[in-house]
Image: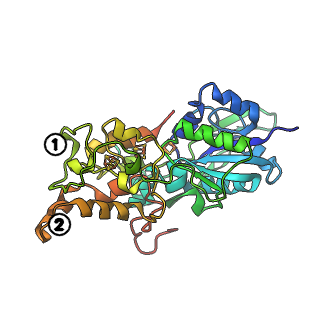
């Protein structure tokens, strides 16, 4: 019997998702026993043309990490989709846009200006920016087009499963491998994590207390046993899906939402605003104003990993700008 | 002139490709390393609270 084929790819990503697969340690050998890995840039030397030469749907499982922020990533997403029976959005970037989707608060031109002109390490008097096509003496060079807007994988191609997390924890990766090996993958569309919120899985004491102010980390030493939010520290637990093992909160750090919204929640940031508003002690407009002032960078905190997947998707583009 | 593309370069973090130009006798005339990717941390870290940066910039490279 021929072994099933697995492909792994990274788009706008950090490589942490690939390392998470390697973090399965000796179990990675089980994966290699179980399946042939036919494409995996971080670890194996297969090229794009190898994938192009494969028959359609000949890859059994594609674990795609990273968001889609340029035309090459979009093309490879479409290519791997055509070649794969099952497409998995692997990690927060692929599922929700992740950290790269903080770029949706800005535009391509603003990023170019900062990176290639203003940054202290740039000397670029001629204002040279990356071009999709450059003529050189020997011929032509091409680069992908960077988009203004970072997209999730599912905004570009059909996706069968979602594995959230930045990166996904090893126990979830192994569970997916088991489900795949035993032919027991869940119904299409499933998000492979918990069906509860992070707060439901968090063991800190919750006293249903109102908070009088919001603290930044340097303004308070948090009690390690009490709910962080009830101590006035913004924690995204109420608006985040469980399944990570409450990793950050156990390290006395507030959650930042890398597992995305819990079941039934469409917009993670909006849910968090309502959760915070409901526990904030407010006797009128003055208190509400103070709360708004207390929260530094609300958009970048409430949509830390989920801007591409949010209802707003991005900061509005100047009139006449490219692709939104 | 003939062009050989090494795309993508593998087994390192990040994205890259190499274009090698050869003359008629197969000798290398020139080669270019291109980085086809930019996420823009330099820009989108602006405006984020300083205490949050240790949780944002590790995602520059997670290898
Ligand atoms: S989800 Fe996190 S670990 Fe995975 S590629 Fe994105 S930033 Fe890296
Ligand atoms: S808000 Fe944070 S600290 Fe409080 S219960 Fe939820 S996850 Fe735990
Ligand atoms: S606590 Fe929140 S930010 Fe941390 S790993 Fe879990 S879901 Fe992600």
Q: Is A256 or B40 nearer to us in this picture? A: A256
Q: Residue at x 64, y 35 (%)?
A: B10
Residues under numbered marks 2 and 1 in contact, where contact means CB atoms less than 8 Å apart: no
Q: Chain of mark 1?
A: A
Residue A67 seen by the camera: no
Q: Is A238 or A36 nearer to us in this picture? A: A238
- Looking at marks 2 and 1 on the same chain, the residue that comes earlier in the sequence is marked by 1
Circle 1 packing at 10 Å, graded few (<14), some (14-19), many (20+), is: few
Labels 2, 1: one chain: yes
| Mark 1 secondary-structure assignment | helix
| Mark 2 secondary-structure assignment | helix
Q: Quadrant of the N terminus of chain A?
A: top right
Residue A246, image quadrant:
top left
Circle 2 packing at 10 Å, graded few (<14), some (14-19), many (20+), is: some
How far across and down, in percent of the image, does residue A321 sit? 46, 70
Q: Which residue is mark 2?
A: A288
Q: Which mark is residue A219?
A: 1
Q: Residue at x 71, y 52 (%)?
A: A86
Quote the CA–CA distance across marks 2 and 1.
20 Å
How far across and down, in percent of the image, does residue A260 sit? 46, 54
- Numbered disc total: 2
Residue A221, image quadrant:
top left
Q: Is A70 or A122 nearer to us in this picture? A: A70
**For the residue with label 2, is its CB less than 8 Å from the closest atom of ligand 2?**
no
Q: Chain of mark 2?
A: A
Q: Which mark is residue A240?
A: none
Q: Residue at x 59, y 40 (%)?
A: A173
* The residue positioned farthest toward the bottom in the image shown: A319
Residue A132 horizontal side relative to residue A166, left or right: right
Residue B59 seen by the camera: yes
How far across and down, in percent of the image, does residue A320 sit? 46, 74
Residue A243 horizontal side relative to residue B42, left or right: right
């Amino acid at each position: 019997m021929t072994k099933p084929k697995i492909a792994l790819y990274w788009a706008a990503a950090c490589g942490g998702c690939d390392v998470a697969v390697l973090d399965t340690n000796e179990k990675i050998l089980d994966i290699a026993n179980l399946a042939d890995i036919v494409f995996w840039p971080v670890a194996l030397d297969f090229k794009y043309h190898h994938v192009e030469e494969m028959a359609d749907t000949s890859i059994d499982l594609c674990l795609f990490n990273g968001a889609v922020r340029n035309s090459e990533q979009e093309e490879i997403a479409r290519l791997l989709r055509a070649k794969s029976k099952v497409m998995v959005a692997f990690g927060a970037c692929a599922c929700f846009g992740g950290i790269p989707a903080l770029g949706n608060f800005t535009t391509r031109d603003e990023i170019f200006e900062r990176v290639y002109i203003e940054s202290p390490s740039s000397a670029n008097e001629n204002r040279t920016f990356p071009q999709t096509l450059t003529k050189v003496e020997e011929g032509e060079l091409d680069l992908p087009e960077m988009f203004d807007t970072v997209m999730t994988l599912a905004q570009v191609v059909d996706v069968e499963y979602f594995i959230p997390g930045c990166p996904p924890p090893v126990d979830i990766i192994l569970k997916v491998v088991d489900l795949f090996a035993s032919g027991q993958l869940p119904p299409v569309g499933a998000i492979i994590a918990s069906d509860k919120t992070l707060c439901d899985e968090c063991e800190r004491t919750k006293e249903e207390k109102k908070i009088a102010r919001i603290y930044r980390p340097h303004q308070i030493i948090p009690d390690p046993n009490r709910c962080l939010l009830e101590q006035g520290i913004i924690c995204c637990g109420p608006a985040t899906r469980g399944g990570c093992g409450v990793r950050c909160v156990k390290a006395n750090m507030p959650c930042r939402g890398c597992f995305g919204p819990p079941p039934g929640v469409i917009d993670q940031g909006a849910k968090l605003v309502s959760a915070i508003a409901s526990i904030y002690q407010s006797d009128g407009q003055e208190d509400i104003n103070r709360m708004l002032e207390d929260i530094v960078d609300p958009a970048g905190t409430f949509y830390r990993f989920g801007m591409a997947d949010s209802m707003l998707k991005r900061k509005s583009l100047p009139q006449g700008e490219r692709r939104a | 002139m003939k062009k050989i593309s090494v795309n993508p370069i593998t087994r390192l973090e990040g994205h890259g490709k190499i274009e090698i130009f050869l003359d008629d006798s197969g000798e290398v005339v020139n080669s270019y390393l291109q980085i086809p990717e930019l996420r823009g941390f330099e820009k989108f870290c602006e405006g984020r609270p300083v205490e949050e940066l240790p949780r944002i910039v590790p995602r520059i490279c997670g290898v």
